[in-house]
Image (cartoon, rainbow, N blue to C red):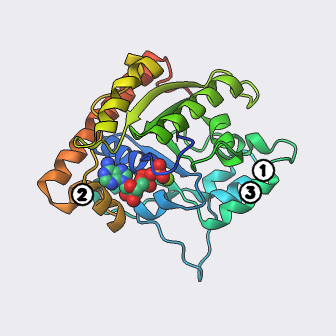
Amino acid sequence: MGTRVVIGNHKGGSGKTAYVVNTAAALAAAGKRVLVVDLDPQANASRRLAWRFDPANPVPTVSEAIKADAVGVAADAVYRCGWDGEIGDGIDLVPARFDLENRISEAGVVGAGTRLRKALEGVDDAHDVTLLDCPPSLGHLTQMALAAGDVAVCTVEPEYDSVEGAVRYRDFITGRGGDLGNPALSLIGFVVSRTRANVGAHAYQIGGLPDLFGADRVWSPHIPEQAQIKDAADAGVPLRQLGHPRAAEMAGIYDELAKRLVTALTAAGKAGAR
Ligand SMILES: Nc1ncnc2c1ncn2[C@@H]1O[C@H](COP(=O)(O)OP(=O)(O)O)[C@@H](O)[C@H]1O
Ligand SMILES: [Mg+2]
């Protein structure tokens, strides 16, 4: 049995997808089985995990799984990720395409909010951790992820708008978890992303995070803005595959954060929640 972790922030560019992809790699490198569910029509996680849609051989993605409105149907949309090697072996993916946009207009249909939960039922029982990558929105796609999740995590860039987006994500979970049919959902941690040592505003914002979110929920280490993280994302390969010492160092930071995640899941009583 595993745990579903919903990664969000009501702000784009806060490093949500970078966290999902690199944490999947870190967990897989530690021998865990990971499922990544891409809930963003931008499909950045799917591309960065080297998954390709072939129009000549169309296959179901998360959009079709949600549309089907049937228990366990996401099983038909689980694929091994496109990365080589043992890390790739440990990561499965329910990918997205741009047509996931078409699901948004179905928000008013009876039961729409729990369609993803229904689709995933029984599908990720063999995965230790399922990471759900949200769009920078608190709309229907994120709401379906929150309805399906066991816990939530927020990535936050230490900049004014990103911190405000994190506050809105937190308040939405706290205030609306019950309305989403998931009152037990809790936000267990904040991952501080894209920090720049030479930006005074970053130091100022980082200093305010413990008061705002609770010192024990602001996780360490922080993830610096580092070219290799973007290079690996752009190339669609694991950080360590870049073969650059700084890329290995960044992978080490995600390893530490993956341990922090596992500790937090245990502390919240959510390890193997399902
Ligand atoms: N720590 C980092 N250092 C450098 N580039 C980063 C870092 N984190 C994310 N990026 C890059 O910044 C952009 C936005 O990050 P992304 O993970 O896509 O954010 P989100 O999913 O929250 O919109 C992407 O191009 C990504 O590769
Ligand atoms: Mg993203």
**Would you identify the image quadrant in which residue 96 lies?**
bottom right
Q: Amino acid at mark 3?
A: Arg
* Residue 4 appears in the picture as rendered: no
Percent of width and height locating residue 85:
28, 59
**Which residue has dot 1 on it?**
69
Identify the secondary structure beneath mark 3.
helix
Percent of width and height locating residue 97:
59, 65
Residue located at (68% from left, 27% from top): 177
Which numbered tag is attached to residue 147?
Answer: none
Q: Is residue 171 above or below residue 52?
A: above
Q: Amino acid at mark 2?
A: Gln
Identify the secondary structure beneath mark 1.
loop
Identify the secondary structure beneath mark 2.
helix
For marks 2 and 1, give the CA distance. 40 Å
**Residue projecting furthest to the front:** 200
* Residue 161 appears in the picture as rendered: yes
Percent of width and height locating residue 212:
46, 21
Bin the neighbour count of mark 3 within 10 Å (Cα to Cα): few under 14, some 14-19, many 20 and up. some
Bin the neighbour count of mark 1 within 10 Å (Cα to Cα): few under 14, some 14-19, many 20 and up. some
Ligand 1 closer than 8 Å to label 2 CB: yes
**Which residue has dot 3 on it?**
103
For marks 3 and 2, give the CA distance. 34 Å
Tell me if label 3 and label 2 are in contact, CB under 8 Å.
Answer: no
Q: Amino acid at mark 1?
A: Asp
Percent of width and height locating residue 262:
38, 28
Q: Nearer the viewer, residue 32 or 98?
A: 98
Mark 3 vs mark 1: give the one in front: 3
**Which residue has dot 2 on it?**
228
State left or right for residue 253 relative to residue 233. left
Residue located at (64% from left, 52% from top): 74
Residue located at (35% from left, 56% from top): 88
